[in-house]
Image: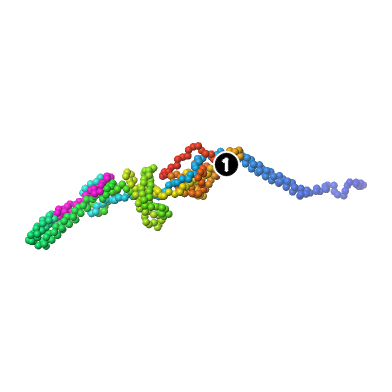
Amino acid sequence: MNIVAENKISGQPIDNKAPKRPVRPVRWFIIVGTLLAVLVGGLVWFNSFRGQMIKQFFANNKPPPTPVSVAEAKSEVVPNLLTAVGSLVAVHQVDVSADVNGRVTEIKFEPGTRVEAGTPLVQLFDAPEQGDLANYKAQATVAQLSLDRAKQLASRQFGPQATVDTAQAAYDQAQAGIAKTEALISQKLVRAPFAGDLGMRKVEVGQYLTAGTAIVSLTDLSELWANFTVTEKDSGSLKVGQAVRLKVDAYPGRTFEGKITTIEPQIATDTRNIRVQATIANPEKILKPGMFVTTTVVLPEKPAVITVPETAVDYTLYGDSVFVITEKKEEDGKTSLSAVRTFVQTGNRVEGRVEIVKGLKPGDKVVAVGQLKLQSGAPVSISTDPAPQIPVQPPRY
């Protein structure tokens, strides 16, 4: 068998192919890096584009200004008042009672009527005392006759002076018995100790009363006391004779006048308060003892202070603040208004206005109504609607 040799035939097997060359790792790094760079660049561009679009949206869609009512901070002299609470007490008030024991035989008054001092109210059984009185009067008559006879005899030197002294003692003893019995009888007739208005009757005919049992209340309404307390800090500004204004729930809108008549010389150690008493005339007799009163003491005037309406102040745990109106010019030359929150230090509140101790100056314009919808720097417009009236004293519920 002849084997023909060819030039293109090698000594390797025919089925074996030449191995492929491996892809270099650098190429993969380049591809992956390029993809990451494109992805990151796309995200950065998207965020930048979104921010610009949001800014452009809000720039072109500004909310309309919030309508608010505006008030001006004023420099004025406000009344220097000290407010406290207390109650009314009658200057003359008593539960009329009997001085001695006895049975009621007659009631001489009508409940709810006015009586004068000395008016008989209740009669107790006094028949034994009346009998003793008649007995002592008879003894006094006999003693008077004996005394006159003894004096005549002694003047003529027919009788001793001792007889005159004995007759005089008997007469004086009878007069003393009369006075004592009349006092006992007067105790059995209960009279009004002073003029005033009677209350409800508490006894009945035939009832046996012991000494001190209340028969009826008697109150003089022509003059009352208002008792109230103030703190130790405010006690130094009080003086006897200062004017006091009082208000009661029974007559809203009315103010009653009085004057301080008594200041307790001691301060309570438990509360550190001092008791004060004012006297109030009550000619109409509409004020009643026991009424709850709000008292306002008129103190000497203080220098002028800055005030704003009560509704302009926002009271929070972080402090008291107001919204001050500020003006600024826009790029187009127009003037816009905005409300800026400004923290202030407040003082007393008097007749619907608040003292501003620090934070404002006279002439500043503040938001009086509508600040609940505002944020600091928000655009506002001045409302043409009139601001609601501020009550001097808020109603109680």
- The reply to whether residue 226 is in sight is no
**Residue at the (76%, 48%) spot, across then down:** 27
Front one among 76 and 184: 76
Q: Residue at x 17, y 55 (%)?
A: 178
Left or right position of 320 against 185: right
Q: Which residue is mark 1?
A: 328
Q: Nearer the viewer, residue 376 or 13?
A: 376
Colour option used: rainbow
Give yes or no for residue 35 being in the magenta stretch: no
The 10 Å Cα crowd at callout 1, few under 14, some 14 to 19, many 20 or more, is few
Q: Give the vertical position of 27 relative to 57 (above or below).
A: below
Residue lying at 43% horizontally and 47% vertically, measured from the top left: 79
Q: Quadrant of residue 272?
A: bottom left
User: Amino acid type of disc 1?
Assistant: Lys
Q: Position of residue 362 (x, y in %)?
A: 50, 45
- Residue at the far top in the pictured view: 384
Instruction: Tell me where residue 377 sits by quadrant.
Output: top right
In the rendered image, residue 319, in percent from the top left (x then y), is placed at: 51, 49
**Taking 137 as reference, is 300 left or right?**
right
Residue closest to the eye, 305 or 27: 305
Q: Residue 359, percent across and down?
A: 51, 48
Count of numbered circles in the view = 1
Q: Position of residue 86 (x, y in %)?
A: 38, 50
Location of the C terminus by quadrant is top left
Q: Is residue 393 rendered to the left or right of residue 327? A: left
- Range of residues picked out in magenta: 111-137
Q: Secondary structure at mark 1?
A: strand
Q: Could you say which is closer to the camera, residue 378 or residue 332?
A: 332
